[in-house]
Amino acid sequence: MTTLHHFVSARLRLAAARAGSMRLTLVALFALALLPRLYRLDAQSLWLDEGGTWVEVTGRSGKGWLALLAELFSPDAGYPLYHLLLKAWVALAGDSEWALRFPSALAGAAAVVAVYLAAAEVARSTGAGPRASALSGAEGWPTRARALLPAMFVALSPFALWHAQDAKAYSLLLLVVALELWALLRALRREDARAWLLVLALALASLFVHRLALLSASGVALAYALTRGRLAAGDLPRPGERRAWRSLLRPPTARWAGLVVAGACGALGVAGTILAARGEAAAAERAGVGPLVGLGLTFARFSLDRWPGDVAGFLGLPAPVWLLPFAALTLWGLALLARDASARGPAAIALLCLFISPLALFGLTLALAPVFQARYAVSAFPAWALLLAYPILRQSGQRQEPEVGWGRSRLFALSSVLYGAAVVAGVLMLLQPDRGLFSGAPVKEQWREAVAELAARAHPDDLVIVHPYYVLPLYEYYAPRVTPDPLPQPVTFPIFGEGDRGGLADPTRAQLLEHVRRRYEPFFNQVARGKKRALLLIAPDHARSVDPPKTLEELTAEWERAGADPARRPVAADRYGWLGLRFEYPQRTWPCGGAEYVGVAVMCQSFPEYFRLAGDPVAIPEPELPLAAVFGGELKLRGYTLALHAGAARPGGTLPVTLFWEAAQPPTRAYRMFLHLCQDCERPPPANQDGPPLFGYPPAGDTTTWRVGDPVHDERAIRLPPDLPPGRYTLLLGVYPADQPTIEARLAIETDARTLGANRLVLGEVEIGP
């Protein structure tokens, strides 16, 4: 008895040590996977879809807790559980970029752990007993070490990391699908009621995370159906278990039940994906993509999170070389899985079902609604990650595999080299200049930077337009974050409603463009009436969905009808529709610059006179504070207007100043003007603005084109540092030749107003508030 007692105690201590070691491995793996997901988490600006998430979880869509709870059971809601969880988190942590993305980072790190558990099940599926536990450590370190390979791949995958740093539901969907895969592999090994109930619970929970989980649920049901024929009588539940459970395990009942569920989930998943694709057509990555091309692009996105053209030439290598290790491992893994599945291997059948079924249904979706989004195929990603590692995982379980061809050791070495090349390629994609998520370059739409640029230019009386209308949440999110100043209320063009066909059943493109133009012109004229400047914040790729630009073919046809002047032959399609073209090619207006960012642009146009409708009297903008001064005998200042946002100037905001000029004599040179804000004006100014009029854009931005007596108004804004001490400051103005930025070259001033040394005109005093 004593010997037996010591033996049992030793076994229990060994099992406890192994379980503790396994738990430590899981915790360490989670922590290591979390590190790259938190790296530069808030470096990129929110993009359009993340702005939509912010609207949903902060109640700006009009949805409260009860509405979001009701969406759990609504067929129209895409991912209701994610919004509920994020809403609760935002209530605690706030709605900063970091806070909005942090739950996705957590889910992404947990998905790495789930992939590891699934890989451990695959690796030991042929070499462990039917009741061994994946958490017990009984499979030994070689198997567990090999199971780390797909986990490491997912931890460093550009595709997985992108979604882990995105305030969307896809990282959480990746987690639940990976858990679903692990639970399925575990249930196929254990074959007990609790294991299958866990699979069912995860499958049901995944449907609340995202309706796209129906694609993976179809694969689970199909795997269940295809593996039922392998059960022997001894594998059935014990007599104490319920008859209903026993009947479901028995073929052919189980097969038919699984096939029916798989078909139903697949049909619902395809229908839901089509609805999502049509609803997100404006944000589609590729339009008009068929099944084969779509699956090829999905492979490229899974592998490198790039379009093939984006990696061609990187480090001097063509795109096929970058994709080669992924393609080789995919084909190799599929061949081995097919062989093992034909031998009724349950793990092989499960992996094939959860890889092929979601992709096949995704391909069917593309055949019916050809709007491509790689994220719609995310349900297949965990199985694909295991498929890549299958040539390595399989050898850890099949210890008696005979030497064939090259031999087992050489095949293992080849698969390891290919797998290492795939991991290295993914890491290099993360660091690829100008495109990599960790390259330091902007790779998402730069709404933060674009709104900051607009805020640095805006005057309270400007017409600010945001286009298209559905990107307004990004302006509303960033405006109070980039400036303390209350910016002008933006105008959108809801008349550009997607799907508006002007009452025509099947309009031609020309009819649709004409309909848009007729609705747009009166609306613009009305909102611009009485304004002297307009700023446009536009997302060109999104705007084309509601305000379509003309194609090269359409422009060529117009050119031919106009006489086919060779000097005016169009060479490219328009980038903008009606609204953007007004700013790109101004007529009877002055362009006043702009800025181009990733996915977003800021454009500016100034009206020589207040914008008027037909019949309105002509009104020239005049200064609120007249002040006469002539610089260098050529440029005459008529006065200025100090238009403070909400009547105050604040540190971190701007000081909007409009200068009103005319030419006293024909200017002989291009000039620049500076504005200085100072208390001790003999020291460098703590805030200043320097540049040509209207940002140097001709005609009004080039002083050599000014005609004597023609008025010019020049809107400027001095950026006030966030740490600028409150108090009273002096505002100074000076002019100098653009090619001589020296104090000595500043133009002499003729005026009755106060001046300071170094040819500086005192405009007035400004109070900077706290």
Image (tube, rainbow, N blue to C red):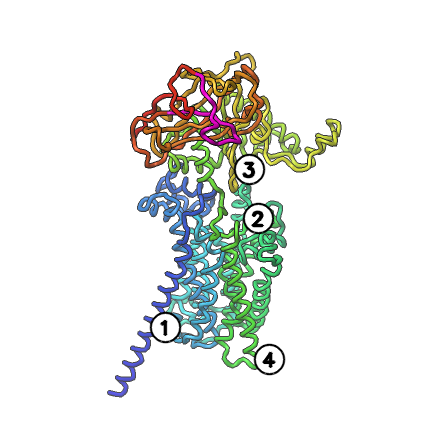
Front residue of 202 and 264: 202
Three-letter code, disc 4: Val
Q: Earlier in the sequence, mark 3 or mark 4?
A: 4
Residue at image position (61%, 61%) is: 321
Q: How far across and how far down the image is residue 168, in percent? A: 44, 48
Distance, label 3 to label 4, CA atoms, is: 58 Å
For disc 2, the neighbor class at 10 Å (few under 14, some 14 to 19, many from 20) is many
| Residue bearing mark 2 | 372
> Residue 373 bears which disc, if any?
none
Q: Earlier in the sequence, mark 2 or mark 3?
A: 2
State whether residue 258 appears in this view.
Answer: no
Give the secondary structure at mark 2: strand
Residue at image position (38%, 23%) is: 756
Distance, label 2 to label 1, CA atoms, is: 43 Å
Give the secondary structure at mark 3: helix
* Residue lying farthest to the left in this orientation: 2
